[in-house]
Each structure stands twice: as structure tokens, then as C-alpha cells.
Amino acid sequence: MIGPGGKVIKKITEETGCQIDIEDTGEIRIAAVNMEGSKRAEEIIRNITEDPEIGRTYQGKVRSVVNFGAFVEIVPGRDGLLHVSEIDWGRTEKVEDVLNVGDLVMVKVVDVDRDGKIRLSRRALLPQPEGYVASGAGGGGGDRERRGGSGGGGRDRDRGPRRR
């Protein structure tokens, strides 16, 4: 909760204008001039101290963009992967066409694996387009139909006699 050098607490106090004290017992006290700051500080602290819950929605900040998606910080110090296929209902060619580092994005936690890795979805929060049909529906098989061809998986069988 405190972070290295009190970094997490300092960030919360700067963002909310509250004073935060953490007792040795683990009790956290929030002192605020206004109710909005107090509520925001409490929300941030609750998010930090509880485990991400499958099905819960968070407003996260894009920390990095990679060719297969984006890493989104949903609470301070906790990132999840927003896979490119979970950004929108349609195909997203380039993640940067939709998301950039620093963007705030609403995401839903769709899975947390045994190692604590968090999978996120933005698409789950968007209305499904009318008449939407998932690509690959209808048994197309994608690129598997193009692989191999005749001759057993694309291997060259005409290399000459085998050595035994």
C-alpha cells in the first residue's frame, strides 16, 4: 500500500488533497477538507488493497502499447493485458489507431489466472453492433486451410534416398 519511499501514498495525497495515515495495525485514516477528495482517496485505497475481481469494471490508464494489445493499469501498481481482440467488436489492425499511452479507458476484468495475470476487455463494455457476425464463424478454419497443402504438411519429400 505504501510503495517504495511512500510513492503510492504521496500520489494519492497529491491527487485527492487528503492526508493519509497508516497505523502499524494496518488501519488507514483519511483526513480531507472536502467529501469528494475523501471518497476518491477511499476508492483508490480500496482498489489497491483488494484483488481485481472478474466481472468488475475499472477506468484504467494505458501504460504501454504492443502489437498484440495494450497494458492497462487498473489500480496503482496493477496492470492487465487488453488483447487486441478485446479492444472493439470489429478487427483492430493497429492498437495505436484506438489507444495510446496515457489514454484513460474503461475495461472489464474477464480473467485472472493462477499467476495473477489479469485479462481485460473493452469490447465487453461496448454494445454489440446490430447484425454482428464474428469472423471465423461458419467453420472457415482460417489459415489452417492454407497450410500444408498436398504432400503432408509442406515438407519436401523429394530429397533423395534416405540414409539409415
Image (spheres, grey):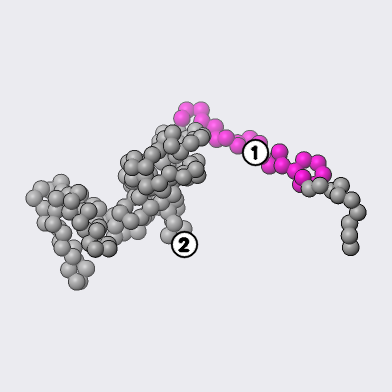
Q: Is residue 4 above or below residue 160?
A: below
The quarter of the picture where residue 154 lies is top right
Left or right placement of residue 62 versus residue 33 in this view? right
The quarter of the picture where residue 24 lies is bottom left
Is residue 57 visible to the viewer in this orientation of the structure?
A: no
Is most of the magenta stretch helix, strand or loop? loop
Q: Residue 129: percent from the left, percent from the top?
A: 46, 30
Q: As rendered, which of 81 and 124 lies closer to the eye?
A: 81
* Tag 2 residue: 114
Q: Which quadrant: the N terminus?
A: bottom left
- The answer to whether the residue labelled 1 contacts the one labelled 2, judged by CB atoms less than 8 Å apart, is no
Which residue is rendered at x = 46% and y = 58% of the image? 113
Q: Is residue 78 above or below residue 60?
A: below
- Of the numbered discs in the image, which one, if any, rests on residue 133? none
Q: As rendered, which of 155 and 108 lies closer to the eye?
A: 155
Q: Which quadrant: the C terminus?
A: bottom right
Start-end of magenta stretch: 129-154
Q: Residue 19: percent from the left, percent from the top?
A: 13, 57
Is tag 1's residue or tag 2's residue first in the polypeptide sequence? 2
Which residue is rendered at x = 29% and y = 57% of the image? 48
Which residue is rendered at x = 43% and y = 37% of the image? 96
Question: Which element type, helix, strand or loop, lies under badge 2?
Answer: loop
Q: Residue 156: percent from the left, percent from the top?
A: 81, 47
**Is 131 part of what is drawn in magenta?**
yes
Q: Amino acid at mark 2?
A: Arg
* Tag 1 residue: 142
Question: Which element type, helix, strand or loop, lies under badge 1?
Answer: helix
Q: Residue 40: percent from the left, percent from the top?
A: 20, 49
Q: Amino acid at mark 1?
A: Gly
